[in-house]
Amino acid sequence: MELKNYSEAIAWCEEGLRIDPKEKKLLEVRTKADKLKERNIKLVVEPSSEEEEISDGLAEICLNGFHSDSATGAKVHLDADGNLSWPVLFLYPEHEQTDFIEAFHENSRFIDHLMVMFAELPPWDLERKYLPSNLELYFEDEERAEMYELNPKDTLLQVLQHQRYFVKAGTPTVLAFVKSSPFSKTYFSGKKVHRL
């Protein structure tokens, strides 16, 4: 119950009640777990101590001067339907700015988030170029030093399932550029770019 895994708690209670159908404590726990599960309380996936050690070793993302050390403490969450919501970091290299989405549902499209994020122009966009329809999104394969352009209409899950996408420190990262801008042309010069 402390792990908020109510389905598993119910299963264990049922197992115990088969042995002793009148065990008061099991009946109480079963009733409480049923009530909490009915309320559709979201589950938080807690990493094991071994996973935390591995995560600590990967705690820093470094993309051309940008760093993320998971200072927000945001974690991946599992909902009652078995879908994940991820913390996602957007990087804007041209302006050395970032946006952080604490809970980006894996079935949400990038364009939907961009529409909300850029409903109003950010104060650092003095040239008024950062419009959802004017942005290109990429992820970086650091191992191969290659970039992959993603379709803004893709869901987070579709991008995460790409064979060359690697999540570091539990936070997917996406780079955003203005289409055909001089900065993006310079940034991508000498880099291999793939289109998804």
Image (cartoon, rainbow, N blue to C red):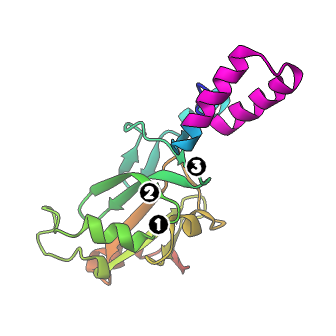
User: Do tag 2 and tag 1 residues touch (Cβ < 8 Å)?
Assistant: yes
29 in the magenta segment: yes
Closer mark to the observer between disc 2 and disc 3 = 3
Q: Quadrant of residue 6?
A: top right
Query: Looking at numbered disc 3 in the image, what kind of residue is underneath it?
Result: Ala
In 3D space, how far apart are the residues under numbered discs 1 and 3 (Cα atoms)?
Answer: 16 Å
* Mark carried by residue 80: 3
Q: Rounded to the nearest whole Å, what is the CA distance between mark 2 and mark 1? A: 7 Å
Q: CA distance from mark 2 to mark 3?
A: 16 Å
Q: Which residues are magenta?
A: 6-35
The residue under label 2 is 104
Marks 1 and 3, the one that precedes in the sequence: 3
- The residue closer to the viewer here, 76 or 44, is 44
Amino acid type of the residue tagged 2 in the rendering: Phe
Going by the numbered disc 1, the residue's amino acid type is: Ser
Q: What residue would you read off at disc 1?
A: 108
Q: Taking 44 as reference, is 28 above or below it?
A: above
Point out the tag, 2 or 3, that comes first from the N-terminus: 3
Which-is-in-front pick, marks 1 and 3?
3
